[in-house]
Image (cartoon, rainbow, N blue to C red):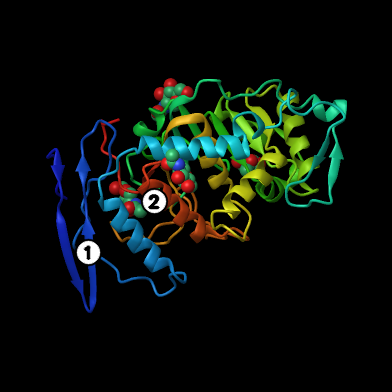
Amino acid sequence: MERHPEKLSIPFIVLCLGSLLITAFWIIVDNGHLVPSEPPSLKNIPPWPSDLCKGCRELIEKARELYSKTWKKQEDNYRNFSSQLRSQCQGFDRAIITQANTPVGSNIVYSEESTTTRMVTPEIFSTFIKENPFPKKKWDTCAVVGNSGILTNSSCGEMIDSAQFVIRCNLPSLGKGYEKHVGNKTDIVTANPTLLNRENGSLNGPRRPFVESLHIYGKSLLLLHAFAFGFCTPLCLKAAYSIRDLESPIRPTYFNPDYLRRLTNFWCSRGLHSGLLSTGLVMVNIALENCANVHVYGFWPFSIHPFELNAVKNHYFDDETANWGTHSINVEFNLLLQLHSQGVLRLHLGNCRPGKN
Ligand SMILES: *[C@@H]1O[C@H](CO)[C@@H](O)[C@H](O)[C@H]1NC(C)=O
Ligand SMILES: *[C@@H]1O[C@H](CO)[C@@H](O)[C@H](O)[C@H]1NC(C)=O
Ligand SMILES: *[C@@H]1O[C@H](CO)[C@@H](O)[C@H](O)[C@H]1NC(C)=O
Ligand SMILES: *[C@@H]1O[C@H](CO)[C@@H](O)[C@H](O)[C@H]1NC(C)=O
């Protein structure tokens, strides 16, 4: 494969494959932060998969087109957006339940079941973190890392780890040779309750294997949806008690359902009318309130690579097939594309160049 080391190069490749015309642009901008390289091999380029979801081809083409333009942070757009989020959702001090914002005796209303409520007892309260984990002054750079197979062989590990604050979603695999492509630094890692439920026998058996599996995340915050549905609370409390009893350094915390409701309303008024917000999108929003520069990696809900056109697995670390459940993942992805094109955040879809960060 050929490399294009020039400061700014736009290799332009037109491929004809039967009646199919695929146009792709690559831009390498050496601004000390950047990205794509690696033009695809001209062999083995498959046609669009026949099982591509409805409307997905258009979204992929749109992503490709937007991504071909040089990205530049638009400070005004970023400020406007970040301050709207701050005033309407208040994630900077309400996204996570703390002893300061949720005292004993408060009534928690579940985010996905408004008829389920729970009074905060001293016992539950003792599992809340004491203080807001987000600093008064914004972090300079945050990386929000999704788990898409688009990260496979991306060489983005060093760039991801160079962020001041790294957020990962849903207990991803780390190490095992993945570090070159996804990094290994973690400040927040989320865990979906259905994952705890399914993979670890609802934590009813021995808890040590589960707690030991968390060691790769070090002293990070483990962010749990403890108050989404009723079944989540006992499960998340079991996880929190196991971590405490086995003196693991990871710090369990809970999403604040009040914040999730505000965020749902915020996005509802901007076109996201159905489906539960994905945890990934929630984390991007938390980052936008707390970080001056938000870089998003591993968010790609499609089964074909936008530039290399090879198959992309749902996760970089396993063969599980995609099941977005009630999430409107295409609509969410379209919103991320919009924020990228407005210069509010930067979506990384290409490969990163080793040695650059
Ligand atoms: C901020 O964004 C809103 C809606 O997205 C827009 O109506 C408003 O004009 C923007 N304000 C500035 C100062 O750009
Ligand atoms: C990633 O790279 C390895 C080693 O070069 C290769 O065997 C594998 O097929 C690549 N995977 C993808 C999805 O490109
Ligand atoms: C993983 O992270 C630790 C710090 O948490 C660092 O010392 C180590 O070099 C990292 N390993 C790799 C392979 O990047
Ligand atoms: C579930 O437990 C197994 C060990 O029994 C562990 O390897 C795995 O990582 C755990 N999964 C999660 C999501 O915690």
Q: Residues within 10 Å of mark 2 (few under 14, many from 20)?
A: many
Q: Position of residue 309 (x, y in %)?
A: 30, 61
Kindly identify the amino acid type of the residue bearing the numbered disc 2: Ile
Q: Position of residue 142 (x, y in %)?
A: 45, 31
Q: Taking the image as drawn, is residue 4 in sight?
A: no
Confirm or reject: label 2 Cβ below 8 Å from ligand 2: no
Which residue is drawn at the image coordinates 26% and 52% (left, top)? 68
- In depth, the one of 311 and 146 nearer the eye is 146
Q: Residue furthest left?
A: 6
* Above or below, 35 relative to 247: below
Kindly state the secondary structure of the residue where label 1 is placed: strand
Which residue is drawn at the image coordinates 59% and 30% (left, top)? 92
- In depth, the one of 203 and 228 nearer the eye is 228
Q: Position of residue 17 (x, y in %)?
A: 21, 73
Which residue is drawn at the image coordinates 62% and 61% (left, top)? 274
The quadrant of the rendered image in which ligand 4 is seen is top right
Q: CA distance from mark 2 to mark 1?
A: 19 Å
In which quarter of the view is residue 210 placed?
top right
Kindly state the secondary structure of the residue where label 2 is placed: helix
In the picture of the structure, the residue carrying the numbered disc 1 is 23
Q: Is residue 52 left or right of residue 71?
A: right
* Label disc, if present, on residue 31 of the rendered structure: none
Query: Of discs 2 and 1, which sits in the foreground?
Result: 1
* Above or below, 129 relative to 175: above
In the picture of the structure, the residue carrying the numbered disc 2 is 150
